[in-house]
Amino acid sequence: MIPKESENKNVIIIKENELVEERKEEIEIIDLNDDDDGIEEIKFIPSQKNEKKIPQSKILFNQVKEILPNIEPIFLKKLISSVLKSNVDKMVGRYDLFTWLMDYLTTNLDYPKIEEKKKRGEGKRENGVEGVEGVEERKGAEERKEANGVKQNVIMKNKKMEEDINWYEIKLPVSSEYKKFAVLLLQNEFQTVSIRNIKKEFTNSGFRFSPAHRKIMLYKPTVYFIRKGPRKKVNFEEKIIPRRLILEREFVQLQMKKQMELNDQKLAMKINDQEYEKFGAKLTCMCCYVPVSFVNMVSCKDGHLFCCDCLYNLVKHSIGQRKKEIRCPCVTKCEFGFSDEMLKKAVPENVLKNYQQLVQDSEIQSAGIKNLKKCPFCNYAVIIENPNIGNTNILECKNIACLKVSCLLCGNEAHKGKTCEEAKEKKGTDFRTYIEEEMIRALLSTCNKCGQNYFKTKGCNKIVCSFCGESMCYLCQKSINKEKYKHFSNKAGHCKLWTTIKDDEQNIKEAKKIAKLKVNQMRKNLKNKKN
């Protein structure tokens, strides 16, 4: 949908299904000094029934191909198909897809090119061998997944992930339509704030609606920011607003509603606390023994009463210790926990989400799900049904807030056709940093059951994993669930229960020595490649 000026300068007419190619040379400029756009109404003209619709995939293909003529066509078609199937257009808006694709391709410059593919094909024909890569590139996205035998069972649904997006923090490329309608929505909502200041905050916020809205909300009613009288609203239909902007507006409205409810709750608690104090009706917290009003208290499942602050601190401590169990802190050694209702009452939403994520991760680990793979950049997880077929070290994240393709071996973004070490060399590995990382890894150990890394600071050498409860020996890394302390002995050839810091220092020195040898070898390889 592309705006065109009509004969009446105060009206913008928008035609549906007008191609984006017609605006290639148009550049969107936001004038920070302009205090009034003069736009009072935006009209929407639906498309004619007989008008032929060009597929969006073809439009995107032609746009990208014109800017990047050397990109491999099959790769581009497959990329556009996968993007459209993953519902990214609902996330970033229909006309933001081109910007999103260009941003993705320019940040991943190792995409397949026509010249490179021809060279590879010529080399294979000379040897008389048909390449597997050429066959795979001709297959569609679904056929390739079936050929690899990798069927992804998504644990986290797209709808849930869309609800969890924090639009204040997320940074995605935006289109000119997004910018135009974002400014219009802001000026409609803040009618007493000058358009000049609205555009200024929108620009300073990276042309993003949500953070700009939050900044303008903090404006104080001063002469510098506020107009003498409210401005007229610009009328337009909801269906012409980009999808991403609608999601952001709903998110901002929800955050404002939550903040208002929180402020009302704090005020009500303050008034109740004063009334309880007046009549001497406060109760004593069974953890900190401070008098608290009943409305500011929570109870365990056995009825012991605590203040909200104590339960909040208990949850934060559990998150720090990576323990999902929250026991009653009563001195009577109560073994009951707290209900979800009590947790919601005492713990802020952002902290409670972290705790719920901890519980979810712990339950997945304890379930012992085989071939479970997790995205290194978010909480997305998937089960690989046939791990022996295809490359299971590459994970395509379906989380619409992430959508990264990662290498599960090194934890970085995927590096097609290169090993993890070669990818590091291409980025320009800092050898000093590499040595320091190897020295740190010398102190890290890995759980035998769940694979979680841990670091021992003090205590004996019997380790209990805080994620899955596995008992291990810190020295030999053996599981000792049955033996426990019987595994340790001061006899020669046995693991000691207690060791000194000097033992760890020796491990660090050995790791440093090995890392230096590897660095020297890597430097030699780089010199040989240059020559």
Image (cartoon, grey):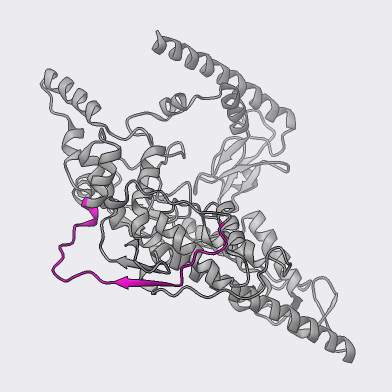
Q: Is residue 338 visible?
A: no
Residue farthest along the top direction in this orientation: 531
**Up-down relation of residue 203 to residue 130 (above or below):** below
Q: Would you place residue 498 above or below residue 322 in this image?
A: above
User: Is residue 36 found inside the magenta-colored segment of the image?
Assistant: yes
Horizontal and vertical percent position of residue 40: 46, 72
Residue under the point 41% across and 61% down: 156
Q: Report which quarter residue 508 is drawn in.
A: top right
Judge left or right: residue 151 versus residue 338: left
In what quadrant of the picture does the C terminus appear?
Answer: top left
221 or 125: nearer the viewer: 221
| Membership of 55 in magenta stretch | yes
Q: Magenta residues, as a range?
A: 34-58
Q: Say above or below: 412 vs 168.
A: above
Residue lying at the far left of the rendered structure: 128
**Residue at the (38%, 43%) spot, across then down:** 104
Q: Quadrant of residue 259?
A: bottom right
Q: Nearer the viewer, residue 405 or 306?
A: 405
